[in-house]
Amino acid sequence: MGRVYDGIDDRLANFIGRQHLFFVATAPTDLDGRLNISPKGLDTFRVLGSHRVAYLDLTGSGVETIAHLRENGRLVVMFCSFDARPVVLRLHGRGRVVEPADADWAELSPHFPDLPGARAVIVLDVDRVSDSCGLGVPIYEHRGDRSGLIDFAHKSGPDGMADYRRRKNAASIDGLPGLSPPGGSARG
């Protein structure tokens, strides 16, 4: 049923590339802090190597993943097959945040579509690749992507998005540093 792999091979990379949805999960170091799981989509995930993946992080109402990664780096990404062949794939490892002002942005950003509202690339150095049966996952049909997040970013424009990130993405719900302030650093 479940298997641990040496890394992401071509078959697993192919499976990942066919998925329209993935989930990211993080947790703060403080045991009283809030755990976070976030759904992601919009063709924003890329396999960069057998032990390295990344996704384009779009501006949203929270900043939990970024804040947790800045604090401790722990990250798991999960893919579920919603078609006929049941499978759940998890990628565990250490994540890091690359913002547009960071040196790695120029190397990483070309891997992704040019979407408005992009606020970071999340890079995961994978140290465990495993699957499980997924027999409890229902079968769903992908009917398309929602446009609301992209529409909001287009409507807000770059200045509006920067203002939104200043107001909504500076700290997590537990008060951990989120995105870097303009001209500053959230890395503490």
Image: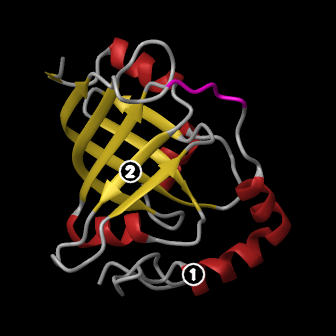
Answer with left or right where residue 151 lies relative to residue 104.
Answer: right
Q: What range of the chain is rendered magenta?
A: 139-143
Measured as percent of width and height from the top left, residue 67 is found at 36, 72
Q: Residues within 10 Å of mark 1 (few under 14, many from 20)?
A: some
Q: At which x and y percent is residue 121?
A: 47, 54
Q: Residue at x 49, y 55 (%)?
A: 105
Left/right placement of residue 60 relative to residue 86 reads right
Circle 2 is placed at which residue position?
24
Q: Please name the residue shown 47% across and 28% down the image.
A: 138
Image quarter of the N terminus: top left
What kind of residue is marked 2? Answer: Val
Visual colour scheme: secondary structure
Closer-to-camera residue (38/107): 38
Residue plotted at (24% across, 71% down): 28
SS of the residue under disc 1: helix
For residue 168, the mark is 1
When asked about the image quadrant of residue 54, the answer is: top left
Q: Does 97 sit above or below residue 71?
A: above
Q: Which amino acid type is shown beneath numbered disc 1?
A: Lys
In the image, taking residue 131 as reference, residue 141 lies left or right, namely right
41 part of magenta stretch: no
